[in-house]
Image: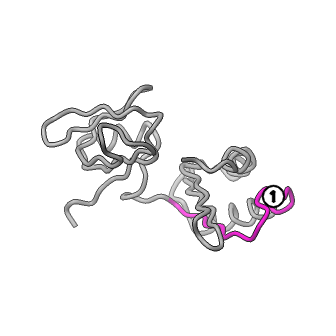
Amino acid sequence: MTHPLIPNITEIAQPIAQDLNLEIVNLVFLSNHNPPVLRVDIRNLSGDTSLDNCEKMSRLLEKTLDANNIIPSAYVLEISSPGIGENLTSDREFISFKGFPVMVETNIEYKKRTQWEGNLQGRDEKAIYINCKGKMVAIPREIVTRVKLENKGE
């Protein structure tokens, strides 16, 4: 389930990322941690994502969130770059990693499961498609919380 603060945080974070030529690929607020953790994954649109990109995003986002009192209590801000083995989010990633093993997680049970492992076949507006041991499964996108590339060979 998405935390209720995510839309407000996203609204503030998107323009900051755009100004820095970055893309926000994932944003989660883990309120079950003490203190809560705001984790933002960014990608540099013009090359590799550097530590400098993460530091700039962190400084500007923290300053803006605090100035607007978006998160009312103490929290930890984590800015990082998603690497291979992390969440797949863009159309480009879904095309590039077709046939690769993935873990699909859902926020509610679908066919009695909340986690699916299989080889990625693609996605469209309606579903994420994976091949589970020779059987094609279409998981509705509205219940998918994460598609993670699995490292089976390691």
x, y percentage for residue 28?
A: 58, 55
Q: Quadrant of residue 11?
A: top right
Q: Quadrant of residue 84?
A: bottom left
Residue at 23% across / 45% down in the picture? 118
Count of numbered marks? 1
Q: Which residue lies furthest to the left in this view?
A: 134
**Label 1 amino acid?**
Thr
Left or right? Give the position of 6 relative to 2.
right
Residue at 21% across / 32% down in the picture? 136
Few, some or many residues within 10 Å of mark 1 (<14, 14–19, 20+):
some
The colour scheme is one colour
In this rendering, the answer to whether 141 lies above or below 149 is above
Residue at 66% across / 67% down in the picture? 77
Left or right? Give the position of 124 relative to 6.
left
Q: Mark 1 points at which residue?
A: 64
> Is 36 a magenta residue?
no
Q: Which residue lies furthest to the front in this view?
A: 112
> Is 80 a magenta residue?
yes
x, y percentage for residue 20?
A: 69, 53
x, y percentage for residue 3?
A: 62, 50
Residue at 59% across / 53% down in the picture? 27
The stretch in magenta equals 64-81
Q: Quadrant of residue 73?
A: bottom right
Q: What element carries label 1?
A: helix
